[in-house]
Structures are given as C-alpha cells and as structure tokens.
Image: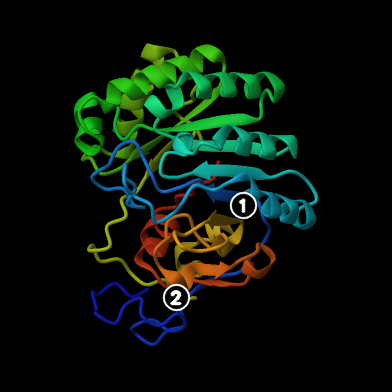
C-alpha cells in the first residue's frame, strides 16, 4: 500500500500515484438500495459529509414517481426482498416520506431509516404515519438515530445547542412505541472504541432503549471522513495484505438513488458517501450501475477498507 502524501494520489481511476494497479470492487449482489430523500435538514452539522442544512437543495425531494421504477428494478434483479434505506438530509422533512416508506414495505423489504429523531419526525402527521406503518408492517422498520456522542456536550458541539435533548425525546418516543432502534455515533472524539461503547451502553441502559451496545450493527461508530488527512491508496495487493475481501465493501452490494437539482430524473451512485464526485455516478438505472467501482477516493480507503465501516444494517 502507498502511504506517503502525494499530490498525485487518487487521480487516476486505474493506477495509483506509485504506478500500481488500483483496487476495484466488482458487484456481487444487491443487498441494499439507498434512497436519498433530499439534502435539506432541520439542522446544520459541523462535519456533515453530505453538506445538508436547512437551505441545502443539491438533492431535491424524491417523490413516489421517482422511487417506483427502482423498486420495480429491485424486484427484477433480486429473488427475494432486500434492505431499503432512506437517508438525507433529514428524511422526515420529505413531504412524501410516509408513502415512500409504505411503498418499500408493501414490496416486503426491510426498511432502515437514518434520522436525527428531532422535530421533523415528531410532527403529529409523521408520528401518526409511523404508527400506522408499524402496526401494518411489524418487524420490518428500523430507525438508526444519529447520536454523535453519549454526552450532550459533545453531541451538541457537532449538531447545535439542545440537539441532544431533542434527539433523546425522539428516541424515547420511538422506544415506547416499540420501534426497532439503532444508534450511529462518530469517532471524532478522543476515547477509544471500548470506552465509547461503554458510554453509550450506560446511556442506553439509563433510558431502557432496545439496543445492544455490544452489537456493531446496533451501535455503529463511524470513522471520520476528513479528506485533508493522508490515507494510503488501496491497490490490488492490499486485499491480501490487509486480509480484507472486496466483497465486504459497501459498493459490492449497495447503490444509492439521488435526484440532483435541475435534473429531470434520478441517478444511481455507487456509494452513499461520495455524492459530489461524478466518477461515482454509475448510471440512471440500477441495471446500468452494476459495473466495477475503482477505489479512487480517500473515503474508500479510510471509511471502508481500513475503517471497516458500512452504512447498511
């Protein structure tokens, strides 16, 4: 692996700065399809990887009409239901969100929703829609709450004063109603993973949330995605050196649907993280998007290959 900072890193999709063959991930199977419901969010986080905010409109709200063809493709490509994920922005700002959820659930899929569990989710109309879907599709809905730290001080440093308490209120409501909950934390803070999990475990036990803090799928601690920090380029040889399989990468099994502002139809991206790098826009249909993905970005190295992280459940 290359590890020295170079202005030539991550330039050529086929060759690294040292002239070695860049690693690629070949499509294996479609396990998760993500739908970015829109880039608008009710808050503006300091380190938001997708640059969401109350005014962000680089991704417009997806509509049922946008989503329907992709669900039809999933049915044609996959022999059984898969995981459908909703991300944003804040998904519960999308005025169609309950119907979008319903469409995925009607097709038998497991639904994973990434949310900050704040005011957009707690509006009476949205709460009523969630409860209706929970009653009709029990055991099919999981909400992953963005809780950057287990203390209000550190969480609010990222998301703004009062954000922690509002998220706790939303999580308490979801827990009381019987929803399946996960937590997404961040590793920007100084404690090691064991200490972080212990801190979250104490918080989870305090509120009696149905979350297994020892299960990495229930409590995800994501590495930071700072493109100014040097990371090695991943070569073909790295798979064996690191004892990591390319089949374990997100882009071997998932794609994300977005609709960019000004575009007349959605597009398919190879990765949920690399939304603003056009080399990772892989087509307009799922079928056309299933080619190999060159790991030509720092996030490929730090988040996925070296960090071992995945957005899917």
Indicate whether 251 appears above or below 93. Answer: below
Label 2 element class: loop
Residue of label 1? 66
Distance of label 1 from label 2 (alpha carbons)? 37 Å
Residue 240 x/y as whole percent? 51, 68
Figure quadrant of the N terminus = bottom left
Residue of label 2? 235
Q: Name the residue at 35% across, 24% down.
A: 167
Query: Which of the 4 image quadrants contains residue 148?
Result: top left
Instruction: State left or right for residue 82 relative to residue 231.
Output: right
Instruction: State left or right for residue 158 relative to residue 250.
Output: left
- Res 184 visible: yes
Residue 3 x/y as whole percent? 29, 72
Indicate whether 94 appears above or below 172. Answer: below
Indicate whether 50 appears above or below 197. Answer: below
Foreground label between 1 and 2: 1
Residue 125 x/y as whole percent? 52, 22
Query: Which of the 4 image quadrants contains residue 83?
Result: top right
Q: Which of 76 and 230 is in front in this view?
A: 76
Q: Name the residue at 45% across, 80% down.
A: 13
Pointers 1 and 2 in contact (C-beta within 8 Å): no
- Res 118 visible: no
Label 1 element class: helix
* Mark closest to the chain's N terminus, 1 or 2: 1
**Residue furthest to the bottom:** 19
Q: Which of 18 and 312 is in front in this view?
A: 312
Q: Which of 113 and 13 is in front in this view?
A: 113
Q: Name the residue at 61% across, 56% down.
A: 253
């Amino acid at each position: 692996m290359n590890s020295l900072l170079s202005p030539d890193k991550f330039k050529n999709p086929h060759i690294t700065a040292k002239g070695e063959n860049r690693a690629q991930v070949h499509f294996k199977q479609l396990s998760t399809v993500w739908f970015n419901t829109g880039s608008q969010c009710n808050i503006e986080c300091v380190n938001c990887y997708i640059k969401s905010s109350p005014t962000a409109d680089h991704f417009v709200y997806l509509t049922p009409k946008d989503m329907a063809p992709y669900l039809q493709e999933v049915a044609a490509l996959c022999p059984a239901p898969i995981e459908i994920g909703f991300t944003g922005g804040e998904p519960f700002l999308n005025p169609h969100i309950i119907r979008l959820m319903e469409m995925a659930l009607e097709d038998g899929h497991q639904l994973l929703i990434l949310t900050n569990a704040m005011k957009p989710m707690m509006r009476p109309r949205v709460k009523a829609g969630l409860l209706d879907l929970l009653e009709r599709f029990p055991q099919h809905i999981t909400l992953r709450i963005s809780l950057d730290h287990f203390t209000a001080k550190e969480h609010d440093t990222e998301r703004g004063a009062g954000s922690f308490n509002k998220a706790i209120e939303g999580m308490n409501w979801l827990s009381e109603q019987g929803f399946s909950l996960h937590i997404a934390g961040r590793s920007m803070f100084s404690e090691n993973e064991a200490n972080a999990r212990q801190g979250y475990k104490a918080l989870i036990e305090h509120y009696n949330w149905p979350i297994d803090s020892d299960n990495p799928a229930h409590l995800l601690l994501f590495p930071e995605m700072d493109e100014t920090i040097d990371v090695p380029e991943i070569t073909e040889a790295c798979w064996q050196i690191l004892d990591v399989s390319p089949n374990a990468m997100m882009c071997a099994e998932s794609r994300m649907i977005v609709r960019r502002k000004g575009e007349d139809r959605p597009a398919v991206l190879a990765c949920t993280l690399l939304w603003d790098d056009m080399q990772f826009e892989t087509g307009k249909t799922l079928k056309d998007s299933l080619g190999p993905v060159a790991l030509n970005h720092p996030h490929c190295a730090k988040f996925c290959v070296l960090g071992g992280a995945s957005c899917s459940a």
